[in-house]
Amino acid sequence: MTRCLLLLSWATLSLLPAQEPVYSQKTPGPGGIGKVYMGREISHVVGHQAITWLERPERVGEELPDEVIRNMEVKPTDVIADIGAGSGYFTLRLAKLAPQGKVYAVDIQDEMLTFIQVRAASVNLTNVISHKGEINDTKLPENSIDIALMVDAYHEFSHPREMMESIVKALKPGGRLIQLEYRGEDPQVPIKPLHKMTQWQVKREMAAVGLTWKETRDFLPIQHFFVFIRESANRAD
């Protein structure tokens, strides 16, 4: 009898559909790495050699950083993670608004993190933490973050599912993810296609890790400003 049940169990399992892989591969397109996630080819990373471009004066008019910060509605005690912080363009601005909190500048490139720490020290910002993550894990403490910010960075993650799962775990219940992406729906936005994302694609990928879309604010000239919420303590577990 037991042997029959075991055979039946194995027969039933063999009929279950195989789990789809998270990623697939293709011939790399222009600016892509050939790795595909939820129908989207992942782009190449902008490296530390692009610090000058990240700090270009024209960015103020093109991307309205002060308006971005205002729309983030930061509280003085907030703990914030700037994911893919790059040169710290937003990190330092946020640190000034959260004097009783702190800002993790999260990046995988040592050159970027050193640049940020030197800049923070030069203006006496002691609440900036240069924090090295990995390509598949932010290495942030669980349930520690009030706001996670990603500015034109997510589309470059080589392991987007794993990275987002680590971000969701780092967010406190009720914590917010603010994501900025160049508008993939608009062919007039002068950015390479793989460095842009549509609203539909962003919402789909964030829902896959249990985040709830709250709103999209379209006050920026060429980017979407997304707000997602982590609604419970165990959605990413």
Image (cartoon, rainbow, N blue to C red):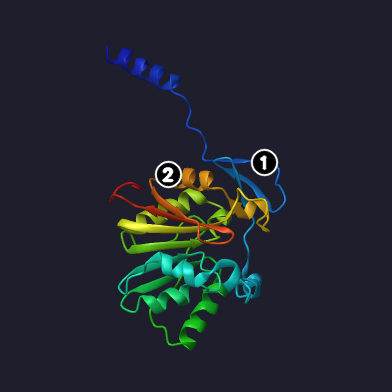
**Mark closest to the chain's N terminus, 2 or 1:** 1
Query: Can you identify the residue that label 2 sits on?
Result: 207
Q: CA distance from mark 2 to mark 1?
A: 24 Å
CB atoms of marks 2 and 1 within 8 Å: no
Whether 146 is drawn above or below 231: the answer is below
Whether 140 is drawn above or below 121: the answer is above
Query: In x, y percent, where is residue 32?
Result: 67, 51
Question: How many numbered marks are there?
Answer: 2
Near mark 1 (Cα within 10 A), the count class, few <14, some 14-19 or many ≥20, is: few
Query: In x, y percent, where is residue 175?
Result: 33, 58
**Amino acid type shown at disc 1:** Lys
Res 5 quadrant in image: top left
Q: Residue at x 71, y 43 (%)?
A: 27
Query: Can you identify the residue that label 1 sits on?
Result: 26
Indicate the quadrant containing the N terminus: top left, top right, bottom left or bottom right.
top left
Residue 72 visible in the displayed image = yes
**Amino acid type shown at disc 2:** Ala
* Helix, strand or loop under label 2: helix
Q: Is residue 1 left or right of residue 120?
A: left
* Helix, strand or loop under label 1: loop
Of residues 152 and 221, the one nearer the viewer is: 221
Residue 128 visible in the displayed image = no
Of residues 19 and 121, the one nearer the viewer is: 121
Check residue 192 in the rendering and tell me which mark sits there, or answer none: none
Image depth: mark 2 or mark 1 in front: 2
Of residues 127 and 7, the one nearer the viewer is: 127
